[in-house]
Image (spheres, rainbow, N blue to C red):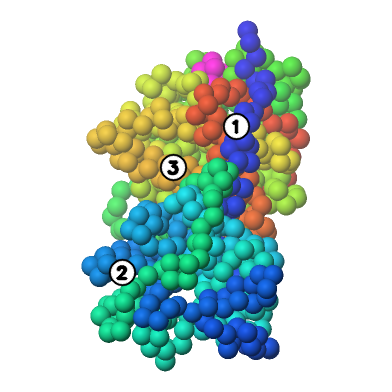
Amino acid sequence: MKARHKQSRDPRGHWLLLLLVLPAMFAVLLFEGWTDHEVDAAKSRSPCTEPAPDAVAYGDGPVVGINRGGIQTASMPARTVALTFDGGPDPVWTPRLLDLLRRHQARATFFLFGSQAARHPELVRRIRAEGHEIGSNTYTGAVLGEASAPRFSRELDLTQAALAGAADLNTTLLRMPRTTSPDTLCGKEWQAARQATARGYVLVAADKASRKPAQGLVRQFSQTATAYQKTAKLLTARGVDRFTTVSDGLDLTPYTPVSTLARWEGTALIGVTGLGRTFSGAMTWVLGIAGGLGVLRLALLAVFARAHVRRLERFRPGAPWVREVTEPVTVLVPAYNEEAGIASTVHSLLDSTHRHLQIVVIDDGSTDRTAEIAAGISDPRVEVIRTPNGGKATALNTGLAHARYDIVVMVDADTVFEPDAVHQLVQPLAHPAVGAVSGNTKVGNRRGLLATWQHLEYCFGFNLDRRMFEVLECMTTVPGAIGAFRRDALLGVGGIGDDTLAEDTDLTMALWRAGWRVLYEESAVAWTEVPTSLRQLWRQRYRWCYGTIQAMWKHRGAVLDVGTSGRFGRRGLTYLALFQVLLPLLAPVIDVYALYGVLFRDPWQSAGVWFAFLGVQLASAAYALRLDGERRRTLWSMPLQILVYRQLMYLVVIQSVVALLFGSRLTWQRMKRSGSAAEQIGGPAPYKSLPTR
């Protein structure tokens, strides 16, 4: 028979996905940040240290070029006005300005931002089609005199690319942002102006407001409501023969040929810009959704955990007491190569205060001394069954066939039990509607930071979740480490299924769908051994997550059921889908955006949000530790857990989802045991419930 416990090769699709998607996301965010002046900002202009050259400040006009003959300036002919509009194209005011110009049969020059041209290429094409002229106002409106050398080049080159992609043109006209009349080309701006003219640009400033239209002028407007009103007024001014473009009025060549490569680059730029805007807008929604889900989960855990405690504490005089369960119990211990811990597990069961036990150790084809060690324990309550290797579900079904009693407890072979654990665990079965009970699993080997993080996860995550699930009547998993069942309930659902890797979750969901209730007994404590290396942890959690998603899909029909099954489906499956699948899938994108915020936006604001969320988590974790009777000094490691451990768990979910989408089949993966689960035996006890369920 093919071994069911062999380790399989993990699918690598998730790494390819992350390596491609996350850097691309960060690159898109960087480009958007550069466009919005968050990265390599150049928004403000410093005071001029030197005046503009006399040939510019007191020249013939506001149009400036530099050639072999030196600085050349020109002004519009008399009775000729060049209307120029900076910025845009604006989706609101550019169309209105174009309509206004068409009604007056006037032409104008639009100095566009390359970023806006890439966002609204249809408006660029309309400007060109209606006979108007297009110049560059740089890509983002950056102050060129304050821009770094790379930004200076990108501001001009990207604008040309955007115009080439949108309207197949390459302009020679440039209006430098934050400049008006020629005398504002001073200090650093003049140095930037010289660099621009060296690239073949003609600089277009504007005449002073005191100049009359009849004298010929270049008038500068923005693209706003005020500009619209002033343009409408100027178009009716007397003494003007024509309203035309800058190049037409001065007989300039406004465009140069566009290469095929430049056209392709422009088309790609427009596509990337659209993607960036979509992604940036979506990130706002993603952050809101993820933040809301995170806060909602913490609120639900706190509220329902408190409700669970109050339910256990509540005692009404005259209320009937549930009888004490003293019936014999069959304990099933499936084991595969568990020689390090099998003796501790069996001996802890033999020390149980519930004396009427049948302990069945099912050796699932172990290749070590597991069966010999178990058989060597001289107690008539212990039975050892040797079977060919077939997997945990097969081993449990084999043990179930040998069970003599109506109450069955299933445990892992690496788990050590408190003396009263079994007795406490079976007490909720006194109610005839209860088909299964989850125990309280605690971390036994807590040495090291990785084990401490898992200890926090067991208390804050798993056990707090179970308290909430009991109140909501939607317990999703009775853990394989410690769980009690009615034998007839197990047989009624066909035993333990082997078509998922999370047989405990699959079984729990099947019981709900069969109409049984599942409870949590926090006072039934078992100490388990957790992985001590990242590789072992990865394998364990990968199997858990993969199997849980399999079980969710298998029992998805519960969402539409009625009664107990429907209540479980709509509550339990929805919770798992939102908080254990969707939220981890969004987490890497959120982390990328958070890193971007720290590096390029307001780091104090980003840090404030992070520390506020950390504070809420610390408070919730402290409450969970108190309920479990644990010391709260381990909370010091929680910030590191969020930064490191939680990211690992997110990647586990991503790998599981990718593996399922790729159709990968994951086989059983076991952890190498050291037999250290008993390190904390007899440790702090959780809150003890009253027998009033």
Q: Nearer the viewer, mark 3 or mark 1?
A: 1
Closer to the camera in the image, 116 or 502: 116
Q: Is residue 91 magenta?
A: no
Q: In this view, does 206 lie to the left or right of 349?
A: left
Residue 349: % across, % down: 62, 33
Q: Earlier in the sequence, mark 1 or mark 2?
A: 1
Placement of 670 over or under 188, stated as above or below? above
Residue 394 included in the magenta stretch of the image: yes
> Circle 2 sits in a helix, a strand or a loop, which is it?
loop
Task: Looking at the picture, tell me which residue is in the foreground, 495 or 230.
Answer: 230
Q: Mark 2 points at which residue?
A: 106
Q: In this view, does 605 lie above or below 452?
A: below
Instruction: Look at the image and give the residue range highlighted in magenta.
Output: 393-398
Magenta part, dominant SS: helix
Reading the image, the residue beneath label 1 is 13
Mark 1 neighbour density, 10 Å: few (under 14) some (14–19) many (20 or more):
some
Q: Which of marks 1 and 2 is in front?
A: 2
Disc 3 residue crowd, few under 14, some 14–19, many 20+, Cα 10 Å = some
Q: How many labels does the image show?
A: 3
Q: Which of 47 and 665 is in front in this view?
A: 47
Q: Do the residues labelled 3 and 1 touch (CB within 8 Å)?
A: no
Q: Which residue is drawn at the image coordinates 55% and 39% (left, top)?
A: 654
Which mark is first along the chain, 1 or 3?
A: 1
Write the residue at 59% across / 15% down: 390
The residue under label 3 is which amino acid type?
Answer: Leu
Residue 473: x %, y % from top left:
35, 44
For residue 255, the mark is: none
Label 3 to label 1: alpha-carbon separation: 23 Å
Residue on which the image places disc 3: 576
Q: Which of marks 3 and 2 is in front?
A: 2
Q: Indicate the amino acid at tag 1.
A: Gly
